[in-house]
Image (spheres, rainbow, N blue to C red):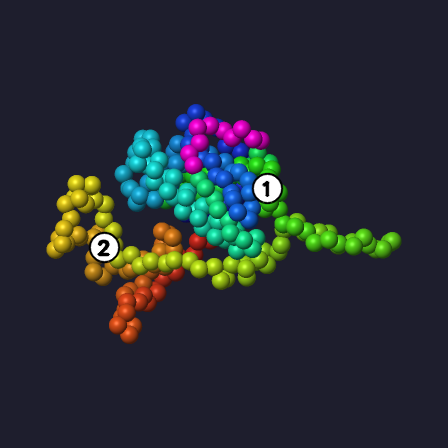
């Protein structure tokens, strides 16, 4: 799923799922997340690779959604730490209701699932965190009389700060296949038991970055070690 940032509000409901995120380390502050029940359900089912429709989120869906948000928070903390020049921790917890503080800014991440159903995540950032994330503008001398000073851009040009992230280490994994198993079958595993996966021998192998498939390919052996010959790379950007 590719998300787009929007400022169009979404009405709140009693069935919404809410989460609180606390930032520590190089930046400090708080963030609140809100998802409608149907959006939470679709994200959880996507994370669990479920295809059967469900009427409302179960406890398993809520746990899966929280784990997905924790993984996203981990990636965001790594990227943010490289940007601000220090370690950043983002701690996610479930929240019973709206935050006690007033949001300094509110944004909405929007996408659609395979069926075209909207998925929306509301993000509120308190004043302390918004101030910490705001780029520090360099001091500019006062212009001489009659000289028009160039406008100060509040954010760096697109791509200007990407170089800071180039040395960030990320873990990638190869996935040959998967299978959902009930707990009794997992507890019955022992040496010699064969677990059949959902992929055939000729199926492409997935290359995952923090649980998300970014490429596919075929397995090769290089100097006695497994490798992947990439045959397809998935572009996360939405079509123009």
Q: Looking at the image, is mark 1 or mark 2 nearer the viewer?
A: 1
Report if residue 232 lies within the magenta region: no
Report x, y in % for residue 95: 44, 31
Q: Nearer the viewer, residue 202 or 138?
A: 138
Q: Nearer the viewer, residue 196 or 201?
A: 196
Name the residue located 50 percent from the left edge and 40 percent from the top edge: 22
- The residue to which callout 2 is attached is 199
Neighbor class of circle 2 (other Cα within 10 Å; few <14, some 14-19, many 20+) is some
Report x, y in % for residue 52: 27, 38
Name the residue located 52 percent from the left edge and 44 percent from the top edge: 24
Report if residue 98 lies within the magenta region: yes
Left or right: 161, with 198 as reference point = right
The kind of secondary structure element at disc 2 is: loop
- Count of marks placed on residues: 2
Asked if one can make out residue 201 in the rendered structure from this viewpoint, the answer is yes
- The residue to which callout 1 is attached is 130
Neighbor class of circle 1 (other Cα within 10 Å; few <14, some 14-19, many 20+) is some
Please provide the residue range marked out in magenta: 93-102
Q: Main secondary structure of the magenta part?
A: loop
Left or right: 101, with 71 as reference point = right
Task: Pick whichever of labels 1 and 2 is earlier in the sequence.
Answer: 1
Name the residue located 28 percent from the left edge and 74 percent from the top edge: 223
Q: Residue furthest left?
A: 192
């Amino acid at each position: 799923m590719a998300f787009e940032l929007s400022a169009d509000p979404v009405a709140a409901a009693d069935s919404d799922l809410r989460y609180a995120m606390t930032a520590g380390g190089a930046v400090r502050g708080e963030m609140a997340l809100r998802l409608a029940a149907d959006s939470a359900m679709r994200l959880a089912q996507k994370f669990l690779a479920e295809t059967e429709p469900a009427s409302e989120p179960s406890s398993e869906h809520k746990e899966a959604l929280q784990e997905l948000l924790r993984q996203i928070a981990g990636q965001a903390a790594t990227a943010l730490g490289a940007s601000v020049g220090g370690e950043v921790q983002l701690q996610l917890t479930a929240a019973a209701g709206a935050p006690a503080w007033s949001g300094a800014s509110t944004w909405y991440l929007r996408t659609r699932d395979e069926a075209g159903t909207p998925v929306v995540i509301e993000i509120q950032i308190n004043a302390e965190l918004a101030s910490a994330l705001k780029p520090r503008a360099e001091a500019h001398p006062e212009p001489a009389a009659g000289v028009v000073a160039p406008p100060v851009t509040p954010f760096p040009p697109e791509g200007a700060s990407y170089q800071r992230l180039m040395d960030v280490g990320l873990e990638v994994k190869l996935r040959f296949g998967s299978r959902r198993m009930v707990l009794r079958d997992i507890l019955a595993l022992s040496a010699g038991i064969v677990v059949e996966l959902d992929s055939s021998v000729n199926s492409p192998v997935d290359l995952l970055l923090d649980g998300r498939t970014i490429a596919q390919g075929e397995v090769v052996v290089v100097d006695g070690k497994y490798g992947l010959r990439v045959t397809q790379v998935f572009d996360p950007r939405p079509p123009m």
